Structures are given as structure tokens and as C-alpha cells.
Image (cartoon, rainbow, N blue to C red):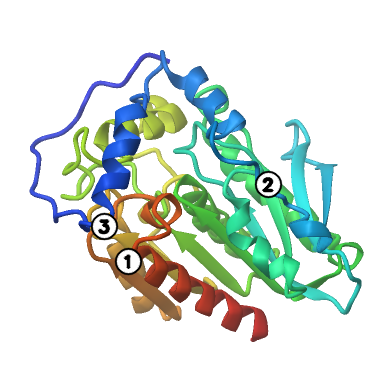
Amino acid sequence: MTDPTPVYRDTPPRPPFDPELVPVLEAALETNLPLSTETLDEKRRLIIDGPPDVLPVDLTAGGAVRVEEREVPGPEGAPDVTLLILSPALDGPPRPAIYYAHGGGMVLGHRRFGVETFLPYVADGSAVVISVEYRLAPENPDPAPVEDVYAGLVWTAKNAAELGIDPEHLMIAGTSAGGGLAAGTALLARDRTFPKLSHQILICPMLDDRFETASSRMLDGVGFWDRNANLFGWTALLGDRRGGPDVTPYAAPARAEDLTGLPRTYIDTGSAETFRDEIITYARRLSEAGVSVDFHMWGGGFHGFDSMAGHAAVSRASIATRDEFVRRALGD
């Protein structure tokens, strides 16, 4: 893959970043490698290795969580899909499930990347969490990633009893690119009539390949996921189809004409991030289609602000609001 040619018409103004977030963003940008064909392998390695000064997450939560990995059937004619399965160590009645797709702009990440967001619900016995390892672009372009996520979801639903899952309480969740894949998979599940999802949790999701909004063009080298990285990710996924008429809503959910029949939705964004406008529009259109939506936009937030700067007041508010929604969803 060669690096894509920019398609920007202008650079619209952006809202200011929250002052408490600025030092974290500046420090991250000092060491951040711009995403390109030349840096892709290095950025993948850095995600696998993790920050040098941060200990790996203990997915067992001190013994409260049972950690398992399974190879399950992938899409027809494609390789198997690996699932990371986190279950409460203490047996109990069937529990709700959170099926998770990781972030990484369609080109980065792995099944353990970001899954700690949902670890507390397993540790306290409230849920089973399954994280899917989907194939990455550009080596595996659309529809490979979303079909992998869907295949893993189908296996999870069909094996709910073995996994200790309540099949009537199956949620899908994702962050960034994973949020887009979760939204696309929810559309697939609706259109293929299996499985039935109770909720979708879309954390700053990547939904639109067309670069038509102001927010998709307003960050150039100043945001953690700016328009250049976004163009690279979408082009890696879609190639020459990016921005054209031959992109399905399963790859870019913002293109879906019909949003009826989707599960209750949590969706959030920062006000100063690339995905802001497409997320606002998707939340509005879901509501117009009769879907129950909890939508939150956090003033001054950049992409991934709450995971990168958890100490900030706006991050604490974002995390607490999402946690409150998830806990209500688990108890529904």
C-alpha cells in the first residue's frame, strides 16, 4: 500500500482542547510516530510491547477472572478467529456478555488492546467479556475485519450456554475503529437476523470514510488521531473504493440508509476529535429511527482522551457516565 493522497478542501476551525488534557496530548505527540506505510510495523510493535514504564494489565484481576483463548470458525473460506474470553472465576447463573472489538484505526491493535475497559464487570461477577482478534488492513481489507467480528459474535451466541452467557443479554462494544466495527456488526446481525443484540456501546467510533464533515478535516498534526491518520486507516481498509459509491454500511456505518431495529445504544465523542460530526449525526439518525440512544459529547476532548488522561476531570466524568450506562445495561 502506498500512502494515500490527501483529499482535504480546507482546514475548518476546531474547539480548544480541555486545558487539563493539553500536557498529556503534547507529551504523546512528542513521541508519536505519524502513521504511514513506513511506520506501520513499528507502531504495531509498540502496541504489542506496551509503554515501557507501564506494567501489563493483570487480566485475572488477582484471581477473580478466568482467562481463556479459543480458536473459532471464521468467515466461510477464511482463517479461524481467536477470541479472548474473560469469565468470573466463581461459577454462577448465566451472565450478560460484552462482546468487544478493539481500536487501532483498522490497521493496529489486538484482542488484549483496550479490553481492560470492561474488566471490572468480569471481576465483580456481573458479566462475561469476549474480545475478538480480527484481521487488520491493509493486508486484509474490507470485508475481512467486520466479517471476522461477526463470525466471532455468531460463535459466541451459539455457544452461550457453554460460556455461561445469557443469550438474551448479549451486548456488542468497541472503541474507535472497533466502535465502527461494532456498529457494522450490529447492522450485519440485524440484516442476517442473528444474533439478537440487547445493546451496542460505541466509544468514539470510526463510522465514515468520506471526509465530508468539518471535524474530519479540522485536525492536521495537532490531534492524536488527525485527518492524516484517518485517511491512512480508511484507505488501508477500502483502497480505491474509499469515498466512492461502492462502500457498504457494514464497513462505514454512517452510510447506512436504514437504522431501524438496532439495539439500545451508548455513543460518545470528544468535541475536538476527528470523528465528532459523524458521531453526532449517527446518534441523531439512530434516534430518528426509533432507537434508544444515550449520546455524550465531552467538551475539549481529543480522540481517546479518557484512556490517555484518566486523571482529568472531563475524563473522570466520561468514564463514570459510561460505567453508569453499562451497569444499568447489565441489570436490565
| Location of residue 4 (image quadrant) | top left
Q: Are marks 2 and 1 in contact (CB under 8 Å)?
A: no
Of 167 and 246, which appears nearest the observer?
167
Spatial separation of the CA atoms under disc 2 and disc 3: 33 Å
Is the residue under label 3 in contact with that under label 1 (CB below 8 Å)?
Answer: yes
Above or below 30: residue 200:
below
Q: Residues within 10 Å of mark 2 (few under 14, many from 20)?
A: many
Place of residue 276 in the rendered image (x, y in percent of width and height, measured from the top left): 27, 56
User: Label 3: few (<14), some or many (≥20) within 10 Å?
Assistant: some
Residue 314 disc label? 1
Residue closest to the eye, 249 or 5: 5
Q: Which residue is mark 2?
A: 132
Check disc 1: other Cα within 10 Å, few if <14, some if 14-19, many if 20+.
many
Compared to residue 311, the image places residue 167 above or below, namely: below
Report how far apart the C-alphas of labels 1 and 3 lie in the structure: 8 Å
Viewer-side label of 1, 3:
3
Disc 2 marks a residue whose amino acid type is Val
Residue at 51% x, 45% y is 103
What amino acid type is highlighted by mark number 1? Val
Residue 313 in percent (x, y) is at: 33, 67
Q: Please report contact status of discs 2 and 3: CB closer than 8 Å, yes or no.
A: no
Query: Could you say where residue 62 lies in the image, as x and y percent from the top left?
Result: 78, 58
Q: CA distance from mark 2 to mark 1?
A: 29 Å
Picture quarter containing residue 56?
top right
Q: Earlier in the sequence, mark 1 or mark 3?
A: 3
Label placed on residue 20: 3
As helix, strand or loop, the secondary structure at mark 2 comes to strand
Q: Is residue 74 left or right of residue 259?
A: right
Question: Which quadrant: the C terminus?
Answer: bottom right
Dot 3 amino acid type: Glu
Closer to the camera: disc 2 or disc 1?
Answer: 1
Residue 140 lies, with reference to residue 104, above or below; the image says above
